């Protein structure tokens, strides 16, 4: 189903024959481009009379293009000699009244300028709003996009926020952050024991583990596509199990904890913990902040 044509009314001053012709040319072009544009030159003798006709056009239009010139500004503000430009003065009162009634919220009245006009020619109530210069193709296209609701750029869908690690000290891991009084945390994951090759050094607070080739740590069958993840919560790294087959977490003191979807599914990691996934093992080495609320002493993490 085709989109209804926007209804547009052109409000302008009869500055000269040349000016009236270029206003009509603008209306002709808009109509040829699918915009239902109206101006007084198309209606030389409205049976209801000019004041009522102008009021009806303003009321029925989706947009009113205010073709701003020095003459328009002078007549709209009542500085023209008596008896001249009364129709334009009437239109300007309608515009100001509509803005007043809407609390100056403007979705209808659009100032436009030809190449010889200045921003100062726009009547003051419309100066806070976007105006369009029609002396170039770019200016006409910008106006056309506004009238047809086709912005040059679409706003992307909102993604998920990224979890980021605290800044890691560039010197010893014991160096305290003097702003917070805490020691920075770091995560290193190795294949096999503590002397194994480094698989991953965390630079974000989320590490994804699974058979998915885009995972941070890729593990073989029978691991799940998304098997688990390690994330930083406050100053504690937490392993969360997601896969079908369980993960065995072995502590340095010999304690083993099975993590599964149907049982215990997450556990805070301690220094030198080892995760056993699908027959492959990795040592998770974690520099604990010693003044953290989550830090422990003795055999709990040694």
Image (cartoon, rainbow, N blue to C red):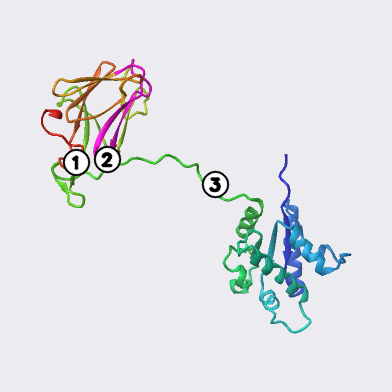
Residue 11: where, in percent of width, then height?
72, 66
Q: Tell me the residue that label 1 is attached to.
A: 292
Q: Is residue 155 left or right of residue 20?
A: left
Residue 234 disc label: 2
**x, y (%) of residue 91?**
73, 70
Residue 36, image quadrant: bottom right
User: Dot 1, crowdedness within 10 Å: few (<14), some or many (≥20)?
Assistant: some
Residue at far right of view: 47
Tag 3 near tag 2, CB within 8 Å: no
Would you identify the image quadrant in which residue 201 lies? top left
Confirm or deny contact between disc 2 and disc 1 (CB under 8 A). yes
Task: Name above or below for residue 246 compared with residue 77.
Answer: above
From the top left corner, tell me how far across and down residue 215 is, in percent. 35, 28
111 or 132, which lies in front?
Answer: 111
**Residues at marks 3 and 2, CA–CA distance in whole angstroms:** 36 Å
Q: Is residue 255 left or right of residue 222?
A: left
Can you tell which mark lies on residue 129? Answer: none
Helix, strand or loop status at disc 1: loop
Instruction: Name which residue lies at 15% across and 29% down.
Output: 300
Q: First in sequence: mark 3 or mark 2?
A: 3
- Residue range highlighted in magenta: 221-246
List the residue tagged with mark 3.
Answer: 154
In the image, 197: left or right of 105? left
Cα separation between marks 2 and 1: 9 Å
């Amino acid at each position: 189903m085709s989109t209804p044509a926007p209804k547009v009314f052109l409000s302008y001053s009869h500055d000269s024959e040349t000016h009236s012709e270029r206003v009509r040319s603008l209306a002709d072009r808009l109509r040829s481009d699918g915009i239902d544009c109206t101006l007084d030159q198309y209606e030389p003798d409205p049976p209801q009379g000019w004041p009522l006709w102008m009021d009806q056009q303003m009321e029925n239009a989706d947009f009113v293009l205010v073709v701003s010139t020095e003459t328009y500004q002078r007549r709209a503000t009542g500085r023209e000699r008596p008896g001249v430009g009364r129709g334009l003065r009437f239109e300007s009162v309608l515009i100001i009244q509509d803005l007043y009634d809407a609390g100056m919220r403007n979705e209808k009245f659009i100032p436009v300028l030809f190449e010889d006009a200045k921003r100062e020619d726009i009547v003051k109530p419309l100066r806070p709003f976007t105006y369009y210069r029609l002396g170039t193709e770019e200016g006409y296209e910008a106006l056309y996009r506004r009238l047809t609701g086709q912005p040059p750029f679409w706003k992307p869908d909102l993604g998920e926020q990224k979890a980021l690690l605290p800044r890691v000290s560039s010197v010893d891991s014991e160096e305290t952050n003097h702003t917070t009084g805490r020691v920075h945390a770091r995560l290193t994951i190795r294949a096999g024991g503590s002397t194994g090759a480094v698989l991953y050094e965390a630079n974000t607070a989320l590490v994804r583990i699974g058979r998915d080739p885009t995972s941070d740590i890729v593990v073989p069958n029978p691991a799940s596509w998304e098997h688990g993840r390690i994330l930083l919560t406050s100053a504690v790294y937490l392993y969360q199990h997601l896969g079908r087959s369980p993960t065995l977490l072995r502590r340095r003191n010999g304690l083993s904890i099975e993590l599964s979807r149907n049982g215990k599914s997450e556990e805070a990691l301690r220094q030198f913990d080892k995760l056993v996934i699908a027959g492959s093992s990795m040592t998770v080495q974690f520099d604990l902040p010693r003044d953290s609320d989550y830090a422990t002493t003795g055999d709990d993490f040694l």
